[in-house]
Amino acid sequence: MSTHEEQNATSQRRAALELEVLYRISKALAHRHDVEALLEEVLDIAEREMGMSYGTLTLRQPDSDVFVIAASRGLTPEERRRGQYRLGEGITGTVAQTGTPEVVPDIRRDSRFLNRTRSRRSAQGAFICVPILHQGRVIGTMSIDRPLSNERELARDVSFLTLVAGLLAEAVAGIREQMAERESLREENERLRRQLGDRYQPANLVGTSKVMRLVYEQIAQVANSTATVLIRGESGTGKELVARAIHFGSSRRNSPFVAVNCAALPENLVESELFGHEKGAFTGAAQQRKGRFELANGGTLFLDEIGDISPAVQVRLLRVLQERSFERVGGDRPITINVRMIAATSRNLEDEIKSGRFREDLYYRLNVFPIHVPPLRERRSDILLLADHFLQKFNQAYGKQVKRIATTAINMMMAYHWPGNVRELENCIERAVLTATDNVIHGYLLPPTLQTGEATRTTLLPDGGANLKSMVESFEREIIVDALKKHRGNAAAAARYLQTTERIIHYRIRHLGIVARDYRAPRTPSA
């Protein structure tokens, strides 16, 4: 075989290898939603397929000009920690500053090569570093060591690494932006909690809307008093969480918090549960038993669904509130207690009073400091914050790694009226986390109650059935919109992400009436 033929054969093998590497990296981009894991997998591919000995991927630290090693091959953890570069510092810093690739044919002969990681014991070979650019701004660098080579081979390596860096840029920027948005939401909620100081301990009151800020203010006002609180609101709004916040924000925080759901107790057992009973007080009372009031002594007793208790128990409850003492069922010895009372109801107690089902004097005893917990439909700005909170909660509970919520799912959640309030939203997110297969909550993972024709862009047949074609197109549209959003409206990048051609993606975008530019992020000034 002639020299020319050998060169052609070598070139073809190299092209096939590069194509294979790009294919594997594209697959990694489609399934990784964590920056460091993605970068590590890219270097794995380069090491496995190209025989790379040393390789590093640096990322710009948020709001700074410092680049640190986020993934590497051939470096120890200590060497990685030493790899930090400022703009203009060494080869890596120069690339970060200029945004253009740098090639050092022999690192022994270039004084700019710092060997800051001190990993190269025998400093010889070539070094290539290329920028990772996103919208004109350097967000990272990619560098490799390779044996001494001729100028043509080095130029080809630079072109190939620049292509890889271009693939990484969209994915890294997208993942980091999602992480920043989630962190911003968490910081906002934490800031609100700090504003309230140490007035409540549980980290389970979530929301920054105006109506929820009013609830937080009321909690702060009443927590350290001894006033009886009546919490009102629809089922599933989080009334017990408010009660716990009041308790843990009070001086009684180290004493018991006892919760009783009055609606869940059989009518003939309510008195025994609340006040306790003596041995032999009734059939089955084999021994003396303390009631919830005694168990809560010194702390807080929370009576949920107070509107469901019987008139007879209402009379006894009124006496306890007036005299702070009671007798157990079957007993005659008064028991004095020091208990903070908090009650809650989803009923309209004023209507219950008019119908004779609830005592007016008890109502006024309970309604010393009323707090209204708004339904979720009145605090829509909190929906995404709550969804993110539950996403993190169930990720941890089930060992999942769901990173984000797709646009279509967000639209459905924002359009829905949430009759079950926060509890229904929590159940929806739990279901979606359990069924998610690609670390994203898509619209089709939400329950059927949220799958409206308007949200899914489907039409119904006369008999109420769904049109198959429109449902398939709706599903396709959701996938393409999600890919465009992920890649800032870049159709070519979306096509690579979906493992299809740019021509096909443009055709489907036109057919489905998608406007790609709607998903482009505004340009930011370069560093």
Image: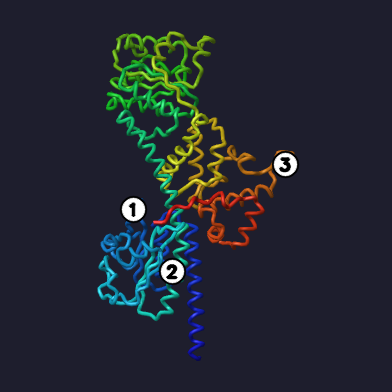
Choose the circle earlier in sequence order: 1 or 2.
1
- 359 and 104: which is toward the camera: 104
> In terms of image quadrants, where is residue 287?
top left
Which quadrant: the C terminus? bottom left
Q: Residues within 10 Å of mark 3 (few under 14, many from 20)?
A: few
Taking the spot 47% from the left edge, 61% from the top edge, the residue there is: 28
Amino acid, disc 3: Leu
> In terms of image quadrants, where is residue 102?
bottom left
Amino acid, disc 2: Leu
Choose the circle earlier in sequence order: 1 or 3.
1
Q: Secondary structure at mark 3?
A: loop
Q: CA distance from mark 1 to mark 2?
A: 25 Å
Q: Residues within 10 Å of mark 1 (few under 14, many from 20)?
A: few
Dot 1 corresponds to which residue? 64
Dot 2 corresponds to which residue? 161
Q: Which mark is residue 126?
A: none
Taking the spot 48% from the left edge, 59% from the top edge, the residue there is: 29
Dot 3 corresponds to which residue? 461
Taking the spot 63% from the left edge, 48% from the top edge, the residue there is: 474
Q: CA distance from mark 1 to mark 3?
A: 56 Å
349 w.r.t. 73: above or below: above
